[in-house]
Amino acid sequence: MSVNINSRPGSARNNRTGSWRVDRRPKFLRQNCIACRLCLLVCPEGIITGKAKNSFETDYVYCKGCGLCAAVCPKKDIEMIPEDTETEG
Amino acid sequence: MKDFIEGSDAVARAVALCRPGVISAYPITPQTHIVEFLASMVADGKLKSQFINVESEHSAASLVLGASAAGERVFSASSSQGLILMSEVLFNIAGMRMPVVLACVNRALSAPINIWNDQQDSMAVRDSGWIQLYAETGQECGDLIFQAYRLAESPEVRVPVMVCLDGYLLSHGLEVVDVPEAAEVDKFLPPYRPTEKLDPAVPMTFGPLAGPDYYLEIRHDLHAAMRGALKLIPSIAADFSRQFGRNSGGLVEAYRLEDAELAIVAAGSVCGTIKEAIDALRQEGVKAGLLRLVTYRPFPEEAVSAALAGVGRVAVLDKAISLGATGPIYADLATALVRGKHQARVNGYIAGLGGRDITIETIREIFTRLSGEEVSAGFVGLKG
């Protein structure tokens, strides 16, 4: 078989789902964050990390750009920005 | 040892000699006898297998899929509506490359409800990725089971195999069947050694998602394995013949085809009737022959094309129909002959649906009609 059809644990990491993003990615503004962790809980990829206020971030290698984190944020402290915007995160 | 038994019993005894770790099936006419025989053997302590009762054929197929993934040799059987209920899982078993062996006791599909024989059930799942072998006799019902496990478990194939036997005609018909000794079977069929299996100590996902980036390749692998089986099937049949001293299985069987001008192509128990009809026609000076398909999937295009070289007119007898098109064997055969640059004229006939008897007279009628009108799906024996 040219393709192994069975997979070992952790192999989903090989799927770099960041390539699925179309034209927007989340930007964590880190201004009014209250560390409610809703963004972390709602992320379907489980790739948002952070503990303290204004410390949360995502992993763009896997972020699919779905925008759920921005939509759920009660302080509107996450913004979906165009993919070609130059920022740090 | 020779015994006078049903085809169902021949299948059950063959399965028992292959010693599957797990057997699961749901009763359905006319398949039930096979699993009743097996359940008795397990209950009487004569067969050390787990016989697991389930609530449907979908569950039976799912169960043997799981047990196969866990590294066991497995067996199931079904018919008609049961096979169709299994169909979702049949595609999964093939796609996951599980060497499951299943006996399909061929029966018509509803509606109208009908418990008698035709081959519509197995033909409806011909695209599922299972190898399909069709038995002609009670003896072959059992013999194909041994060959099916050898084939399915061969590392270069790893594709499930469906052994198809005509309901009642083979499943309930009594014949003298030579049932081999266990030691003989062990020599022919080595123990199953999976390369990967479900094991908590070595976690593994079977049947994960494959997106557009790999699905095509995985389907191509399965197709290539099926095509590769075309080489292995005759060599396993030859091994079988050497060891057990009789011919069973293989890709096709040619009967009086050497100088034939007319030929019928068919699969299953009807071939016995066709042979009788051919013998009678030959005595009357008609140069008739039969090409029996033992292997229907993968389709043995080259063997078919070679066997029919020199035959002027070919009739395909299908006991199933792709409604609105033609019989399934007709379509495959016509394609094979076109690809083989054959000049033969090929007619397709549909007969025996829902258990309508196919007699020597029916076969004579087909040979007569072969010289007349060109048809791709001509029904034989229709009442006016």
Image (cartoon, coloured by chain):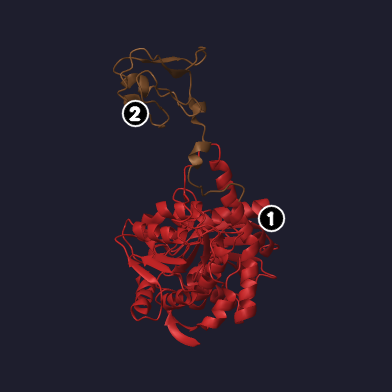
Residue bearing the label numbered 1: B342
The chain coloured red is B
Q: Position of residue B193 (x, y in %)?
A: 54, 65
Amino acid type of the residue that numbered disc 1 sits on in the rendered structure: His
- Label 2: how many Cα within 10 Å (few below 14, some 14–19, many 20+): some
* Position of residue B242 in the picture relative to residue B84 (left or right): right
Helix, strand or loop at disc 1?
loop
* Position of residue B210 in the picture relative to residue B334 (left or right): left
Question: Residue drawn 37% across and 72% down?
Answer: B35
Res B276 visible? yes
Q: Judge depth for marks 2 and 1 and give the one in front.
A: 2
Question: Residue drawn 61% across and 52% down?
Answer: B224
Chain A display color: brown
Amino acid type of the residue that numbered disc 2 sits on in the rendered structure: Val
Residue bearing the label numbered 2: A42
The answer to whether B349 is drawn above or below residue B35 in the figure is above
Looking at the picture, tell me which residue is in the foreground, B69 or B366: B69
Say which chain tag 1 marks: B
Question: Residue drawn 49% across and 49% down?
Answer: B325
